[in-house]
Image (tube, rainbow, N blue to C red):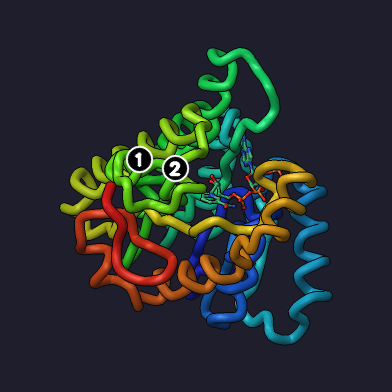
Amino acid sequence: MASDKTIILVTGGNSGIGYETVAALSKASAKFHILLGCRSVEKGEGAVDKMKKEFGSALKGTIQVIQIDLLDRKSINTLKEKIESQFGRLDALINNGGVLIHTPMDILEALRKSFETNVFGPMILTETLEPLLQKSAKPYIIYISSEQGSVFQRNDPNVDIMHRRLRGEPYRMSKASINMLAACHRYNYAEWGCRVLAFNPGWCVSNLTGPEGREMRLKHGARDPKEPAHALADIIQGKRDADIEKNGMVDVDEGVLPW
Ligand SMILES: NC(=O)c1ccc[n+]([C@@H]2O[C@H](COP(=O)([O-])OP(=O)(O)OC[C@H]3O[C@@H](n4cnc5c(N)ncnc54)[C@H](OP(=O)(O)O)[C@@H]3O)[C@@H](O)[C@H]2O)c1
């Protein structure tokens, strides 16, 4: 059905940056078929309804809701089978789904939750989908990271004091780890021409830290998630290939940030 199209999977596509990325990709090209990955199909369908109301005929690329829970290996395997039988390949994987533990919790539990969703799930998903990505003429793998995961910036006195004050070690560690995974996959997958990158979306209004966090982000001038969504659509269209060659996290605005 859509095999002549560019098949793109966005995990966590029902909310925040993922939602806007699905919309930006659909607006960018009728040649895109976007798989809106979500834990709950109901939430995913709700997101598509909202998108249709919000963007109407500006949506050109087709959107399909697909279930994916990064914590569930069976869900990952079923997703692979569905993509394989429907399209035979995958052209781009945007590993966006993630969590930031913002409620008090035992540190071991917070570490486990952060790493399981932000690192282990995306790694297993990517390696499960690797054979389908290998069949693409121009494959991309994008890991949504964060400047919070930059080891260089953690120790840079020139970085904005508000960002330096933030603790959140489990989240920071998980994003530093996803950067290493991106670097490893970039090296491992170079032989079959896959472009692999870690991407910093900037500080955005989203549901990552709950409803109160959303309000706080709005109040303190966090970015509109449409900005990273637009940058991600540019990446998939090959407009940032020169940045992907550089050694660092591809930044929402331009160039790269230090690992
Ligand atoms: N917002 C920022 O300022 C910011 C900055 C840097 C990086 N990031 C990164 O950007 C990505 C998107 O976050 P966001 O800010 O857009 O937050 P968000 O609005 O909370 O969206 C997170 C998405 O991830 C999904 N998700 C959570 N656990 C999952 C799991 N086990 N399996 C599959 N999907 C799962 C959520 O699904 P449910 O709706 O079902 O929970 C939701 O769709 C994350 O990786 C985050 O770390 C965000």
Q: Position of residue 173 (x, y in %)?
A: 41, 31
Residue 154 bears which disc, if any?
Answer: 1
Instruction: Assign a secondary structure to mark 1.
Output: helix
Q: Residue at x 61, y 13 (%)?
A: 106
Kind of residue indicated by mark 2? Arg
Q: Residue at x 45, y 48 (%)?
A: 161
State left or right for residue 203 relative to residue 248.
right
Q: Position of residue 187 (x, y in %)?
A: 19, 46
Residue closer to the observer: 16 or 88: 16
> Which image quarter: residue 247?
bottom left
Looking at the image, residue 186 lies above or below residue 54: above
The answer to which of marks 2 and 1 sits earlier in the sequence is 1
Kind of residue indicated by mark 1? Arg
Number of disc labels: 2
Residue placed under numbered mark 2 in the picture? 164
Label 2 within 8 A of ligand 1 by Cβ: no
Looking at the image, residue 143 lies above or below residue 111: below
Residue closer to the observer: 80 or 109: 109
Seen as rendered, the residue at the extreme bottom is 57
Contact (Cβ within 8 Å) of mark 2 with mark 1: yes
